[in-house]
Image: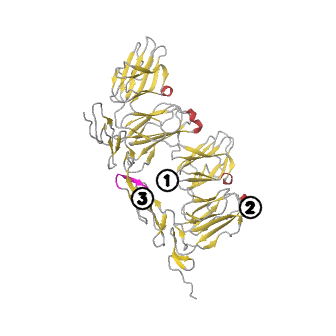
Amino acid sequence: SGACEACPPLTYNFGAASCSMCPVGTYGNADITPSEVWIERNNPIGANIFPPPLTGSSRLRVRYSINSTSAQEDQGFVAVYSPHDGPSALEFYNTGTITSEFGQVSDGPLGQFYPDNANMEWIIAPPGASQVVLYFDYWDIDPSGDFVFVDRCVDLTCASYSLLAGLNGQGSFMQNGLYVSDTGVMRIRLTSNGWNTRQGFQAFFVTQLADCEDTNHTISGDRYGLIRRAPTTVGRCEWTIAGYEATQLDLRFLQTDPGAQAGVLSIEEISSSSCMPCPPNSDSSPDGSTCICRTGYSGPDGGPCAQCESGTYKDAPGSGACEACPPLTYNFGAASCSMCPVGTYGNADITPSEVWIERNNPIGANIFPPPLTGSSRLRVRYSINSTSAQEDQGFVAVYSPHDGPSALEFYNTGTITSEFGQVSDGPLGQFYPDNANMEWIIAPPGASQVVLYFDYWDIDPSGDFVFVDRCVDLTCASYSLLAGLNGQGSFMQNGLYVSDTGVMRIRLTSNGWNTRQGFQAFFVTQLADCEDTNHTISGDRYGLIRRAPTTVGRCEWTIAGYEATQLDLRFLQTDPGAQAGVLSIEEISSSSCMPCPPNSDSSPDGSTCICRTGYSGPDGGPCAQCESGTYKDAPGSGACEA
């Protein structure tokens, strides 16, 4: 005959015979009980019949089910949720890079037509986002050649991308749905021809998307996001939208057509005294009264919990702050810090700090960036627009230490032992003599190759020639002809010439009549060809990076100065074809975990790189192979011994 008693604080009723704490992953002290129904539970939603925009408590539960008699008519819906007191969704008319987590993108105010010959571009790249979700309110694009494109980009450069959509005519969500880039970077492009424009487009983007699930799942309402019941979804859906910082939430349904009598929708406020799921990246506190951030995540009790930034860590759950990693370590999994991986040195993840060229500025015929001076780490990336890949003719760029020696110019014939320089028959504009027989041998000590690039040649075609030879040794007694040139030309016609013996000869011969301006060429001993994956090359000496004609795919290089504090980069003459490629050049923080230079490995503490056995040089490189007759049997900066 005893009466039912109230459960103690921080417990909830479990089976009516006892009270227990909230289950793991939740917090509070009572069963979930809706306190207000915003939409009558059995009010079917038909074609474009939606609840008005709603403002509710910090907990909203949305449920949707199908009438079995009309399930085949269901086309789904989308709703946007947001904190009531949060910032409004910004509208971006100007092209460029957008780092906001939510907003609207449009070519201009509603009713204003986009221009002829438009080439507008937006890149949406919120820091740390795992996805970008785009919803079109509408598009009205002239179908006679104008398009709005949506691209999934591999990274912020959009050098590598896949097309999600190419739209024209008129349309809206109910025809095409959402577009999702699962890389966290999305690009929108609007292109138009020279006639007939229309009103353009308006789209909404977020970084949070919760699809339909049969069982209830909780999502954070502290930021803008979307809930979606995709067309052809079968069964019921349920979401709980929980504001951990927000005290009220807004919910707005977007255009769709679920079909007459297709579904039943209910939207409920949930009491804040309920056992509520913990916010993302947190777990129940020991007493179940709140939720605490996990290791690797920081924030107040109750959330939200943000992942520790690169270079910081947190190794215990709770509200403690993320701490900086100790020197010579880098962030590894956010919960601990480790030394840089074998083969690298430094103390942080690689993060570009400056983009020298607008990331999506196509380079056309002889359109190149000006000569650049950057930090001791430059990353160069290049990719092809799929529509014009066949036009790509490649390019060459020369890199060098900014404070290093200038490239010497050699007019006098003879043997040249420099690792880099320019060779010419004389000053620019001065004609070479009749009956010339001029010869240069380029033989840098220890070089495995000599690479020659012609800025130009202007050789009389009636019998004069400039020859390039691959010599077996310094005598050039045995050689093979790499090129015999006359007339007029430059790199874009003939490319580079490489002697893989480390010895090259250049000869200029002329007959007794008609001379011209001769030639000018640049030589180095380092050449890095295009590779799809990033590879590191030393910037402490002059060298060339090359995307050879007919190369397919993307290229990436990291030019690292181990002794040089700044690097120069200069692009040489070429013709990649109109709109052929996209080029980005980034400075990389010197605090990054950087690859060791060739022939070296990480030091024991990871602070630098040391030369391997058989190679000698200072810590940090460069490391040269021991000469014939010498050896070095331990890693480090020791000298090779006889």
Identify which residue is drawn at 45% across, 36% down. Answer: 370
Is residue 518 shown above or below 587? above
Across and down, in percent, residue 154 comes to: 53, 46
Image position of 583 with respect to 510: above or below: below
Question: N-terminal of the two: label 1 or label 2?
Answer: 2
Residue 145, position in %: x, y?
66, 40
Instruction: State left or right for residue 367 relative to residue 43.
Output: left
Q: Mark 1 and mark 2: span between their CA atoms?
A: 43 Å
Indicate which disc, 3 or 1, sits on the residue closer to the N terminus: 1
Cα–Cα span, label 3 and label 1: 20 Å
Q: Specify the farthest residue to the bottom.
A: 1
Q: Are marks 3 and 1 in contact (CB under 8 Å)?
A: no
Query: Which dot marks residue 127?
Result: 1
Give residue 335's mark.
3
User: Which residue occupies 54% across, 82% down?
Assistant: 6
| Marks 3,2: beta carbons within 8 A | no
Q: Which SS class for mark 1?
A: loop
Category of crowding for the residue at label 3, using alpha-carbon neighbours closer than 10 angstroms: few (below 14), some (14–19), many (at least 20): some
Q: Tell me which segment is drawn in magenta.
A: 326-333
For image coordinates 43% across by 12% down, the residue present is: 511
Q: Is residue 620 visible?
A: yes
Q: Quadrant of the N terminus?
A: bottom right
Who is closer to the viewer here, 314 or 179?
314
- Residue picked out by circle 2: 70
Q: Is residue 327 magenta?
A: yes
Which quadrant of the view contains residue 211?
bottom right
Which quadrant does the C terminus fall into? top left
Question: The residue tagged with tag 2: helix, strand or loop?
Answer: helix
